[in-house]
Amino acid sequence: MLKMCDPSLPSLEMLKRLGAPSFAHFRPKDKFVEWLKDYSQDQRVVELGAGALSFSAILHKEGLPVIAVEPRADLTQGLNPFHVMPMLAQQAVQVLPGELYIAARPDHSGWVSDTIYYMSEGSRFLYVGLEKNLECDLPEDEFNRELVYEEAGEEGEKAWKINLKQ
C-alpha cells in the first residue's frame, strides 16, 4: 500500500502518457486544491464519477484522504494508487455515509441529482463544473446551490455546495 503522500504516485504527465486525458474532463487549479484541503475539514473525499482518476490522483498526492468511485472499471485498471470503488455513485453514498462527495465535470445524464437523494445526514456534496451546466444537472427548484469557489478549474469551472431543498 502506498503512503498518502508517496512521490511515486502518477504525475499528470504520466497519466497523459497512459492515455488518461481523453477522460480527464476536470483540471483543478492549485489554489482550489489548497482550498479543498481546508474545506474538507479532515473529512474523507469521495470523488463520484472519477473517470480516469486524474483529479483523485491529484487529491491523493496532496495528502487528502480520497476514494474514487467509478462504475467503468476498465478505465481504472493500472491507475489506482489509492482506493477505487467500481460502483454507481448512488450506491457509494449509501456504502460510505457522512463523507464529502465531489462530482467534478460530470456528464449530464441525471446521476448527480439522483445521487443527492441517497445521501445521509452529515454528508456534504460539492458540484464542480461550468455554470452553464448547473441547471441541467441540479435544477434550482429542487436543490439549494451555494457558490463556494469561483475559479476551481482551468476551463472556468466553479464549485457549489449542494443540498436538497426542504
Image: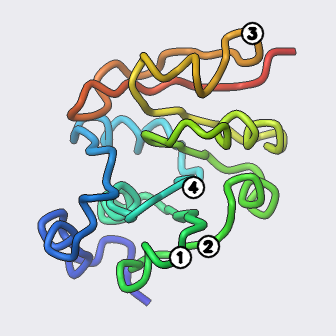
Instruction: Point out residue 110 in the picture as x, y percentages from the top left corner.
Output: 66, 37
Q: Are marks 4 and 2 in contact (CB under 8 Å)?
A: no
Q: Residues within 10 Å of mark 4 (few under 14, many from 20)?
A: many
* Residue at 26% over, 45% down: 27
Give me the C-alpha separation between circle 3 and circle 1. Answer: 34 Å
- Please tell me which residue is depicted at 32% across the width and 31% down the height of the picture: 152
Q: Earlier in the sequence, mark 1 or mark 2?
A: 1
Residue 36 at x, y percent in the picture: 41, 40
Residue density around tag 3, few if under 14, some if 14–19, many if 20 or more, within 10 Å: few
The tag earlier along the polypeptide, 4 or 2, is: 4
User: In the rendered structure, which amino acid carries the disc numbered 1?
Assistant: Ala
The crowd level at tag 2 (other Cα within 10 Å; few <14, some 14-19, many 20+) is some
Q: Which residue position holds label 4?
A: 46
> Camera-side residue: 138 or 39?
138
* First in sequence: mark 1 vs mark 4: 4
Mark 4 against mark 2, which lies toward the viewer? 2
Amino acid tagged 4 = Val
Which labelled disc corresponds to residue 73?
1
Q: Which mark is residue 86?
A: 2
Res 125 → quadrant: top right
Residue 73 x %, y %? 53, 76
Which residue does the numbered mark 3 point to in the structure image? 141
The reply to whether dot 1 and dot 2 touch (C-beta < 8 Å) is yes
